[in-house]
Amino acid sequence: MGRDLTSLFDPASVAVVGASDDPAKYGHAVASQALRAPGRRPVHLVNRRGGTVLGRTAATSLSAIGEPVELVVVSVPGAGFEAAVDEALACGAKAIVAITAGFAEAGPAGLARQRAVADRVRAAGAVLVGPNCLGIADNTTELYLASDRFAPGGVALLSQSGNLALELQLRGGPYGLGFSRFVSLGNQADVTLVDLVEDCARHRATSAIAVYAEDFGDGRAFAAAAAAAGKPVVLLTAGRGSASARSAQSHTGALTTSADVVSAACRDAGVELVRTPREMTVVLAALAAGPRTAGRRTAVFTDGGGHGAVAADAAEDAGLDVPELGARTQERLRSVLWEQSSVGNPVDLAGMGEQRPLSYADTVGELLAGEEVDAVLMTGYFGGYAASDGGLGGGAAGGSVLAEGETRAAKEIVAHLAAAAKPLVVQSMYPRSASCRVLAEAGVPVFSATEDAARALAAMTGRAAAGRGGDGALPPLPPLPPAAAPLRDPGYHAVRALLADAGVPFPPAREVTDEAGLLAAAAEFEGPYVLKALHLLHKSDAGGVALRLKDRAALLAAYREMRARLGAPAHSVEAMADLTDGVELIVGVNRDPRFGPVAMVGLGGVLTETLRDVAFALAPVPAGRAEELLRGLRSAALLDGVRGRPAVDVAAAAAVVERITAAAAAHPEIAELEVNPLLVRPDGALALDARAVLH
């Protein structure tokens, strides 16, 4: 059920330690906000000098209040922080909000102080937000313990940046976005992002959770909490583009960046990942609007060819599909539009709106009724006729008639939406016009920028993607398997044995250290043979792999040449796999310090890093999810056969991906594990090489 944070968000009483009359001090800002709802609960101001603060008598200490206080805000200099926390616990505090800074962010000594304080708080059965935070607020319980006000609404905002939180509030205002809660995360010494996501998921007044985080703590736990939240989670984070392991020793490690890891975790958990505060606002506005749908088939509707073409491109860039409309839908559109209108997709009124504004509503109604249409993006001039600052016929009588017709069209569009229950997003040159306000007040997201409208619609669609069921629900994230006995030997044959025990098929192979062993191994299975020099991480790059050695004589000659050139102490003799009609894949797992094991699948072989056709997911990866990743590659057409080649067994490959990723996930001592190539043929899959790097 998660931690009980009732004392944090709905305490019976509050005290602000460090309350001040000095506007330059944070204790002044918090105390001022705390007094906004004096009738809801007792609010005590504490200042060691006593006297009055903000016109109220201040206690010299928590003990001097003379009664228990459930929540205590500590905003004092660092030297007095521990004493203030200890006094709060002694006075029965069940929740502490620590504004004071100078702990983990200041270095090892500060981290040690922070851990000691958190230990004392937990031992007392209390909870601590911070330290180094900017406070909290809960509009639903009239708890105001941050320096600024947040408009009431349904978004819970959990942020490591106070200024970003303020920007989100400013940007959200025009869309009617408000906040149920605000929490400044601080250093997360005790109450973590995961705790807060879980609690906000249970909070009835919260309809969506917005997160700005640079430090996820336990990233996998965050993903699991978001997946189980049952309400939208939108994430803005920083530093996603830096390489997570520039010193990586495998292709998997070299290709895996922080951006890949965060994107994979968000996709698997159903989190909406955004890049800027503006995009976060757009997505939140969309999620607060009308219905969501499982499909991404989008009809673009415009009153000008240019807007339609730009919007169609923006929709596809956002991951939406813009297919040609079916014959039946096109026929219905022709019945309500004039001859020069385009009905293929984009649908273009081609000037009919100026003659009959209700044609906007007629067209939207037919598009929403189309069986092949999941959502509608309307773009262009709509709103211009009713705009107070101009539009066609601005102040003329004809303009007034058009304005009235456009407003009626907006009301009819709202009626069509109520009947169809499909998403509609609007981009308008005049988003503040009367007709656009009609749409916005009915829950239709209206934007001035085409790219914002497309991104908003993408957030409202595709809910059955990435393993979701038909109701849009996500399955729980695959749990990490129990840790297996550690792998002590990262050598080639030891790694092969670990994976073989997990059910990964390999060709026959033997490790040899001399010519006698080489010939003995060759006698165990038929050629052609493969010879590999061992104890070289990238054998192919060093010339340590010889293929298609047709007989024992060729094998022996290759062995002598390779040993003389490379001096490897051991070699592997293997049966040469039949590469006919095969596709080479790569399957790897890289262990991220925040999100744990992260899997990569893609086009393999020696060109893996050059082609970079790969996809990522949290490991272990179930076979069904693995097949989705493979089908989503740019080169996925190769799997179905090209130029007369037969299709390969993708299901077999996906099953092997599941076994590899499960094995890696069960071995936390493995930093990087890779099978490259995994040969997939029409009759199954076979691992041809493997490597592992220990932490």
Image: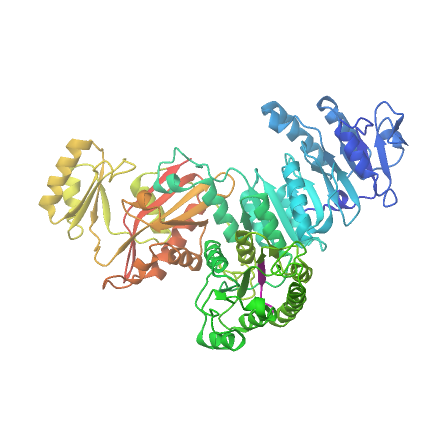
Left or right: residue 570 versus residue 623 is: left
Measured from the top left, where is residue 525 in percent x and y? 18, 52
Q: Is residue 51 left or right of residue 416?
A: right
In-front residue for pair 464/376 = 376
Is 388 in front, or is 368?
388
Residue 160 appears left or right of 522: right
The quarter holding residue 165 reads top right
- Look at the image and say whether residue 423 sits in the magenta stretch: yes
Question: Which residue is painted at 73% across and 26% down in the image?
Answer: 81
The residue drawn where x is 53% and y is 54% is 450
Q: Nearer the viewer, residue 424 or 162?
A: 424
> Does any portion of residue 162 appear in the rendered image?
yes
Is 636 rendered above or below residue 250? below
As drawn, the residue found furthest toward the front would be: 396
Q: Position of residue 123 (x, y in %)?
A: 71, 36
User: Residue 429 occupies which quadrant of the picture?
Assistant: bottom right
Write the start and end of the magenta stretch as one range: 421-426
Residue 695: give x, y in percent of width and height.
Answer: 42, 35
Q: Is residue 65 above or below residue 484?
A: above
Q: Is residue 450 left or right of residue 95?
A: left
Q: Specify how the rendered protein is coloured.
A: rainbow
- Please identify the residue farthest to the left as the structure is shown: 553
Q: Is residue 489 magenta?
A: no
Based on the displayed image, in which of its 4 quarters is residue 542 positioned? top left
Q: Image point 65% across, 38% down: which residue?
A: 185
Q: Position of residue 312 (x, y in %)?
A: 47, 59
Q: Say if residue 89 shows up in the picture.
A: no
* 76 w.r.t. 570: above or below: above
